[in-house]
Image: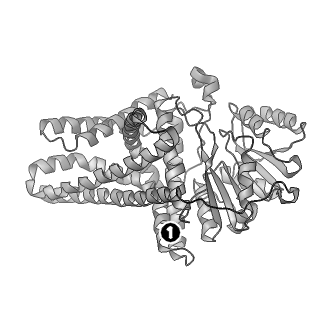
Amino acid sequence: MMLLLSYLVLFFYSVAILLIFFYGLAHLNLFFNYLKSKKVVKIYDKFNFDNPNEIPFVTIQLPIYNEKYVIQRLLLKIAQIEYPKDKLEIQVLDDSTDDSIAETATLVSQILQTGIDIKHIQRNNRIGFKAGALKEGLVVAKGEFIAIFDADFLPQSDWLLKTIPYFKKDNVGVVQTRWGHINRNYSLLTKVQAFALDAHFTLEQVGRNSKSHFINFNGTAGIWRKKCIFESGNWESDTLTEDLDLSYRAQLLQWDFIYLEDVTTPAELPAILSAARSQQFRWNKGGAENFIKMRSRLLSSHAISVKTKIHGLLHLLNSSMFLFVFLMAILSVPALFIKNQYGHLSIYFDFMVLFIVTSIIFFVSYWNTYKNLQGGGIRNFISFIGLFFTFYSIAMGFSFQNSIAVLEGLTGKKSDFIRTPKFNIEAFKEHWKENIYISKKISKYTLVEGLLMLYFFFALYAGFMLHDFGLYPFHLMLFFGFSYVFFNSFKST
């Protein structure tokens, strides 16, 4: 019986590692695509803004919900956008339920007096959440193109002048820009988030877009052609990532997406763990929901290549990697004892080499991204090594919560769209705890994460007692990751 159980443990342990490795190979392909893209200069047809007749009408949509700490910063920044006033309107799509409504109304009135066409649009309910607000705003939007910014984004004044010209070809449906991070160095948490997002917004987005594989509008800091939204079925709220959903529906209809790596849109990262936790949960659950929703349409499409289908499926399954990492992590502890009890099963432990290879792939590709944005040199490389393994560890620390999110998404369990609280952290600094939007409840996952911290501390002890240190680095990162998530969960309240 024990031997049979050992075989089952090692089987699922090996399958998890193998699936992670396949994902690593896909990531390696994107890395090669990214490197090749740097050797190619793409030439795009662009609107000639010297000719007033070629300047299209643009609507900027600002979906907000209870944003009292950032609404002034947002509206004052948007009011500085350089674009002909007779061809620009701003929609403040305000679903707020608190006293921020009055401040927003005052700010909108002040901006309106400067000659900018700005409207304060409110709904009686939050049906469809952000997707519902965007959809309702479209009903009265005058623009041929729809730029969208979340409340924590601060586009440069020439943002529209750098992006709108790329829509000259009628089949261009979306132009997406890269996110910047105004509070990158605020804390270890913001540094890790910036590190991960930089890789997504350079290597992954460029790697896919350069080979015409599907990418996604990232919910903000991008522009849609209104016709593309309507022809693709408009915004839908049956997943938690409406941006990914509409992106895939549009690209399946062969709308082109353009990704502008060199146009950066600054934004504020979630500065405390509870905020990052809610955002991570929404993104990962939404990704799994979109896999269920879009997989059949993707596979049955005759308009796209097999390689694009494979990359599309892996893109939609991104969040599922947390599930495989968590499964591998949990089974690695009994696997340690099995290895020392049943020597003839040692072949299964050779699969760990695949995880090491996958980690090397990520290390090399992330270094390339980091170097391009932060600069090379020995000092930066040493900083990168520390940041990479910290990122790896904290990502593992989120693996339990994110696995729950993925399972809920795959099984169709519905949940509300939980907003990520905004802080304006640089302005409030040490007073961030006064933010009324912070949840005072400890996450229901925190107790389990505390037990997992102890579980992997036991793994470290077991490795020491068995004089088997093969899994020691892996278990050390897991212990650190779950410890970080557990203790910082209390600091967020």
**Front-lying residue, 441 or 383:** 383
Tell me what residue is drawn at x 84 percent, y 54 percent.
50
How is the protein colored in the picture?
one colour
Q: Which corner quadrant holds the N terminus?
A: bottom left
Q: Residue furthest bottom?
A: 302
**Front-lying residue, 186 or 11:** 186
**As drawn, 199 above or below 236:** above
Q: How many marks?
A: 1
Residue type (three-letter) at the residue carrying disc 1? Thr
Tag 1 residue: 308
Q: Position of residue 345 (x, y in %)?
A: 13, 57
Tell me what residue is drawn at x 30 percent, y 53 percent.
357
Q: Secondary structure at mark 1?
A: helix
Q: Position of residue 301 (x, y in %)?
A: 55, 76
Q: Position of residue 267 (x, y in %)?
A: 62, 39
**Front-lying residue, 66 or 480:** 480
